[in-house]
Amino acid sequence: MDFDDTPAEAAYRARVRGLLEQHAVDLVHLDAGEEAADAAQQERALRRTQRVLAEAGLVGVSWAREHGGRAGTLAQQAIVNQELARARVPTLINHIGLGMCGPTIVAHGTPGQHEKYLARLLRADDVWCQLFSEPASGSDLAALRTTAVREGDEWVVNGQKVWTTLAHVADFGILLTRTDPDRPKHAGLTMFVVDMHAPGVTVRPLKQMGGQSDFNEVFFDDVHIPDSERLGEPGEGWRVALTTLLNERVAVGGGGNDLGLSVESLAALAADRVPRLPADRQVLARQAVGRAAVAALANRYTGYRRYTAISRGGLPGPEASAGKLAGTAAAKLVADAGVRLLGEDAVYSRGPDGDDGRWQRNQAWLPGIAIAGGTDEVLRNIIGERVLGLPPEPREDKTAPFTMGSRS
Amino acid sequence: MNFELDDDQHAAAAGARAFFTGSASAADARRALDGGAVAPGRKALADVGFLGITIAEPAGGAGGRVLDLAVVAEQGGTVLAGPSLVTAGRAAVLLADQPELLAALADGSTAFAVLDGPADGSAPSMDAAGADTFLALDGGALVVGSGEVTAGTPMDATRGLASVRLTSRRVLLEDAGARWVTARQVAMVVLAAEDLGAAGRAVQLGIDYAKVRTAFGRQIGSYQAVKHALVDAWVGVEQLRSLVWWAAWAADSAPAELPLAAAAAKAFAARTLERAAETCVQVHGGIGFTWEHDAHLYWRRAKVDRLLLGDEAEHLDAVAELVLAGALQR
């Protein structure tokens, strides 16, 4: 057990830090929680940032060389993540592609798909999105209704997806469809790669409760997809989707990464705000900061354990669900402690004295994290049944045919 | 970075599990409440080498690390073993330059306890009820002596809690404040490790019962209300494991991080064991509220341990103070 860098890791870290300094003028830099002024300009800048990082060898560090990666270790990837955060480089624009779509294509795609997509994904030449949830199937994902019907060498897709992060800027998506409604719901699904610029694809941004527009609804009207863009066999879509979902729960919190503003951000805020409080309120504020810090540290070190396990050849398992669950809870403690430190300043969504509203935005963003990629409740079912071995609830929908007419 | 036990530590955990399973149980903890002996007892712990894990080899110990001790302590916690390895680990730090006393600690020939609070009338201190030789901080000096022991009516008899008034004292080290603080932090880590074991067992008892007990026609573990309560308790245990290992590693390899890590582990342990034990009682329903069932013995351990070596509020405040002073900037 050792949390310090090995000599090799320290050398790698120094090299990464040097590269980030060398390319600093070409990278976007933002403080945690800071918002860019112009969204379109920011998109271009973020694409450039990822391309520059990819060309410097800092994207897809642990991916295989044949897929455009560097065949490095997960520890090296973790070092890159830490150094990017240290250099205030915001989340890579293709984070959905890197965390979820890419690993799914690696696991289930053909060599042709590997060659066509993966290197461009790493460079953000193409931005990716994940088209899973629908208006009538969120937690019950396998109840989805978007259909794909085979016509010769093509499939014709009709239906609607929703809560699709990045769809408004995406070039490609992985799309889960129903191809056989007469089979039980999990058995009649098929996954595709869809060109988001294809005729019949319509993207409409949705406005979130916090006012931002990160996600979208996506409509498919007679969209034609070549059979060569199928991911996995027809009817195997659920198995393919599980690869995506397991990676999602590692990408979102399961690796112990911070969700929302970090405990370090809270420490900086508290160092400024706590001394200004009356003595009796300082005691209460310190309890809140202490509780949030302990939860955040517990989650961070649990993530390190998971990294160690995965780096020794393990696959992300259902345990990663515990990381997202605990990470969300810790993030909420951090967020709430931060907002309460602002006191009356937090009754406005943007404060008066130089405060840019990042804690208020963070507060309004976190409810989505407790829903996205598996709600807290679904994650508890997964952990209870797949890790603890508790019995599932009786379900008829797993075996009955998913006839589109009788769906509820 | 490598955050996993090594093969030797896994083997040590398995060995400790076998030893503790065969030498102590919740039933012993119940009998101790009626005046029975604490199990496995000091002699057995000494014979198996657990009292000297962190004592140097020349002084009769195993020359191990705090992490080695924590791994064994977790297993002791699962069966509510006593006396506590907290006492052994803490005394080993205090007696670092006292080879004769260390040898007597390791071989169990002397029953040590470490006193919290004033030497002239201590706070309730762990394992003092069965001890004859006491270590205390007296006016900034580390002293050893004998004393007059006053045990209260125990909530958890395995903890051997008693107040002590020293009747003789010999100074071992002047200006011992820094060593005393470090020893207490190591004690917090080992206590958190014992709580980790106890919490894990309490959750497992609940899981096992939820798989076999039926109500309204199916196993109660299939109901989300029961399932989710157990999951939350289990997630807490796994998060606590990370803090315990980090804190033990810090004690061995990164002393500058020990104050933060020990306070975090102790604060989190208090809440985690309490939730695990309360969930265990609740999932069992009426049977979990009986004297005969083991659930209340874990509950008792939780309600006592959360107050020992500083409560959650003390340690959360310590964490906040360190964080505000920049302790997260490694």
Image (cartoon, rainbow, N blue to C red):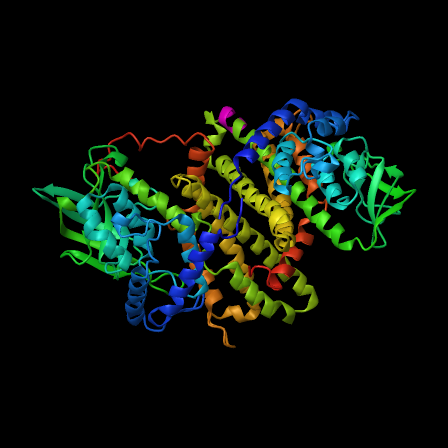
Q: At x 52% / y 48%, what residue is drawn? A: A301
Residue closest to the eye, B140 or B55: B55
Q: At x 59% / y 33%, what residue is drawn? A: B202
Question: Which residue extends farthest left?
Answer: A152
Question: Which residue extends farthest front?
Answer: B58
Q: Is residue A183 placed above or below A50 in the rendered structure?
A: above
Q: Is residue A3 placed above or below B109 in the rendered structure?
A: below
Residue A355 picture location, percent across and down? 49, 73
Residue A234, picture quadrant: top left
Q: Is residue B202 placed above or below A117 in the rendered structure?
A: above
Residue closest to the eye, A186 or A207: A186
A380 falls in the magenta region: no
SS assignment for the magenta stretch, majority: helix
Indicate left or right for A401 with B29 as reference: left
Question: Which residue extends farthest top?
Answer: B22
Residue A176, picture quadrant: top left
Residue closest to the eye, B304 or B40: B40
Magenta span: B209-214
The quadrant of the rendering that contains the N terminus of chain A is top right
> Is residue B187 something that shows in the picture?
yes
Question: Which residue extends farthest bottom?
Answer: A353
Indicate left or right for A194 with B98 as reference: left
Residue A9 picture location, percent across and down? 45, 53
Q: At x 89% / y 47%, what residue is drawn? A: B120
Residue A197 picture location, percent across and down? 17, 58
